[in-house]
Image: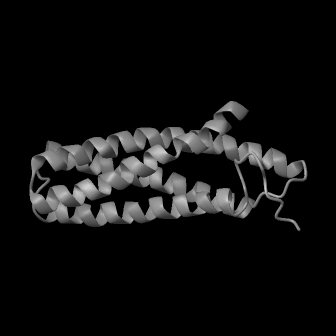
Amino acid sequence: MDFLASLHPKLVHFPLAFLLIYVLLEILGVLSGKEFFQKCAYLFLFIGIITAVAAVFTGNQAADLAEKLKVGGTAIPSGLISEHEDYATASLWYFTALLVLRTFYVIKKKFKGIIQYVFILLALIGGYLIYQTGDRGGKLVFNHGVGTAVRIDTTR
């Protein structure tokens, strides 16, 4: 499963990009009233969730690998890994719920008016979750060297 763990750094950028672009398209679609942006927002949300599933799955494999390395004596900040994992999982479930809700309102033809403005707020909250996930992942890479060819020893 080391192979799947090695894919995590490559895959994480897709859900970050797709879901953050979703947030922008949701805002643009509601404020402009253009159906094109609203449909694009829906598509980016859907693709973002699919890519997030892959990122979370490979991230879990990477966390397992990090735990094995920790047992071997390498200092990897498990608290930060746990926070990153928690935010990533919360983001995945949050955006999945958002997709289900949005689908419901679109099918019922009630995705208009105040509901659209509520979705702007919900999208921004999701953007915050994505930011927190990426922030902790970035700290793991740039402050602790996790997933890089040269690991920084933080025990000194």
Q: Mark yes or no: residue 145 visible.
A: yes
Residue 56 vs 77, above or below: the answer is: above
Q: Quadrant of residue 126?
A: bottom left
Colour mode of the rendering: one colour
Q: Quadrant of residue 29?
A: bottom left
Residue 106: x %, y % from top left: 16, 46
Residue displayed at 74% across by 59% down = 78
- Specify the quadrant that holds the N terminus: top right
Residue 57: x %, y % from top left: 58, 39
Residue displayed at 36% across by 39% down = 47
Residue 122: x %, y % from top left: 31, 63
> In the image as oriented, which residue stretches furthest toward the front?
150
Q: Mark yes or no: residue 103 visible.
A: no
Please give left or right for residue 137 compared with residue 109 in the image: right
Total labels drawn: 0
Residue displayed at 68% across by 43% down = 62
Looking at this view, is 14 or 52 the one in front?
14
- Specify the quadrant that holds the C terminus: bottom right
Please give left or right for residue 87 compared with residue 113 in the image: right
Please give left or right for residue 42 compared with residue 6 in the image: left
Please give left or right for residue 1 compared with residue 134 in the image: right
Residue displayed at 60% across by 57% down = 137
